[in-house]
Structures are given as structure tokens and as C-alpha cells.
Image (tube, rainbow, N blue to C red):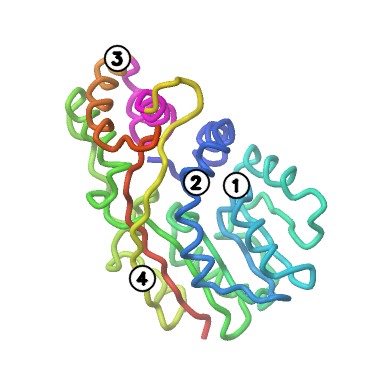
Amino acid sequence: MADARDWAGDQGGKWANLVETMDRQLAPAAAPGVQALAPQPGERIIDLGCGGGPTSLMLAEKVGAAGRVLGVDISPDLLGIARRRAEGVGHLAFAEADAGSHPFEAGGWDALYSRFGCMFFDDPPAAMANLRRALVPGGRAVLTVWAEPKRNPWAMLPARAAAEVLGPAEKMAPGAPGPFGWCEPAIFEPILAEAGFADVTFVEHQIEMQIGMDGSPDPVTRAVDLACAIGPLASRLRETPEAEDQVRPILAELMRPHLRDDAVWLPGVIRVIAARNP
């Protein structure tokens, strides 16, 4: 699983190479959080873990020229893409920084938004407390996270294929940095309470994502190519690259039932967390 250091280096670079593919895949996960945040014209919003900037651009459009959006990420590769995409948008800026320790202007922001950017901190309560202090009193936070792995076939199918060849992956400790680091309320509710947030609630959303990178004319092959290029399966294959030839046909059979309209579509479950700075 990727942690913050991976995103600053190799993982961020790989994501940048596939940014259009990954933006397309994750687009369904952005709308519920933005809708819950309900950005208003003139507001100042931090976009935590902004990556290549698609959500920052969405927020900038909502707040308008009288507002301000700051996208924060630790990947220089992804931020380079974000800055190119945002050329000419004067009220949108980006910072290459660890948001858990970055010296934000205290009380300088109306809202905090994150699509999957909050689960990678080594010290989540301290990091979220730093972000809370950046908010005005009454400022709101909306954080989108993945639900449990077993409810997310986009992750479980590659894991099943890898397990058949390599055996089960090492279990991650609850709350360990990674895409499922906040996968249960019993993990994120105490973190946000310790960080000083109030009125913590969450809503589950079912989403469906198009899986696959450009290249092969066969959509199942495109989906397998992506799983082998980035994500948990790719991490395991980096350690044992000789296993890929065995894993690929197994994963293809698991993906095939999800083929529709010349693409593989896999379901997922997210939780949209809302909280407030007292």
C-alpha cells in the first residue's frame, strides 16, 4: 500500500503517467463530496490531496473569481499537471506540501475538501488538527474515503487474483496509511474527535467506475493492464514480477463478467464524511 512517501516519489510519478485514465476512473467519487460541501461563491477552500487538480478545478468553478482554492499535494509530478491545467484560473493555486504540517493561515479558510487525500498521514490526529486550525470557526470539512475493502471489487478482484498465485497479502493494521486507512467509522471518528472536529457524520454512496488504461482494443485486457500498472496488485508484482504472467489470466476471468458497453465497470462504496470546526 502507498504511504505519503510513495506519493512524493514513485507512486505519484506513476499516477501522473496515467492521470487521464485515473481521473476518468475516479470521477464518480468526486461529485458526492462536492455536493455535500456545497461550495458557495466567494468561499476559500483547501483541497487536500489534490493530485492532478480535477477536484480543485471543480471547486474553483463553484467559488468563482471572488473565492479562492488551494490544492495541496506532495507529488511534484501531479502538481505539475495541476498547474498546467489551471493556467489562467487566477483564484486557484497549488502548494507542494505535507498538509499535516504545512503552516496554513490560521482561520483563513472556510472549508476543507478531500477526495481520498486524508488516509495517508503517519499521525492522522495531529495532521487533521493542523488542517482544522486553518478553518474559520464553524468552518466545515468534507472528506471522501473508501469503505471496507470487501465492499470494493475494484480492489478485491486484483487481490483475489494475486492471492491465487502469491498467497494472501499481508494484512494492514487498522488505520495504517493507505487507501483503506479510514475504511471504518471506528477508525475515522476517533481521529476527527481527537483533532478537535465536531458534529462528525457520514453518508455511504454506491459508485461504479470504468476500469482500464488506453492501449489494447480488448476492454478486459485494458482493465488488467491498469491493475498491473498501478495499485495494490502492481505493488505486489513489483516484488515478484515473474508472477504477472500467471496473475493476468486469472484476473481477466474475474473482470470479464463486469464487461459492458466496451468497458469493464466495477462497483465501489465510498463514505462522505462531514465535520465542523467548533
Q: Which one is closest to the eye, mark 4 or mark 2?
A: 4
Find out whether residue 230 is within the magenta segment: yes
Compare marks 3 and 1 and give the one earlier in the sequence.
Answer: 1
Do the CB atoms of the residues marked 1 and 4 lie less than 8 Å apart?
no
Can the viewer see residue 121? no
Q: Is residue 30 above or below residue 225?
A: below
Image: magenta residue range: 220-241
Image quadrant where one finds the N terminus: top left
Find out whether residue 219 is within the magenta segment: no
Circle 2 sits on which residue? 4
Circle 4 sits on which residue? 203
Compare marks 1 and 4 and give the one earlier in the sequence.
Answer: 1
CA distance for labels 1 and 4: 28 Å
Q: Quick one: 186 or 100, which is closer to the camera?
A: 186
Residue 245 tag number: 3
CA distance for labels 3 and 2: 30 Å
The part of the image, by quadrant, that contains residue 63 is: bottom right
CA distance for labels 3 and 1: 33 Å
Circle 1 sits on which residue? 74
Compare marks 3 and 4 and give the one earlier in the sequence.
Answer: 4
Alpha-carbon neighbours of circle 3 within 10 Å: few (<14), some, or many (≥20)?
Answer: few
Q: Quick one: 87 or 176, which is closer to the camera?
A: 87
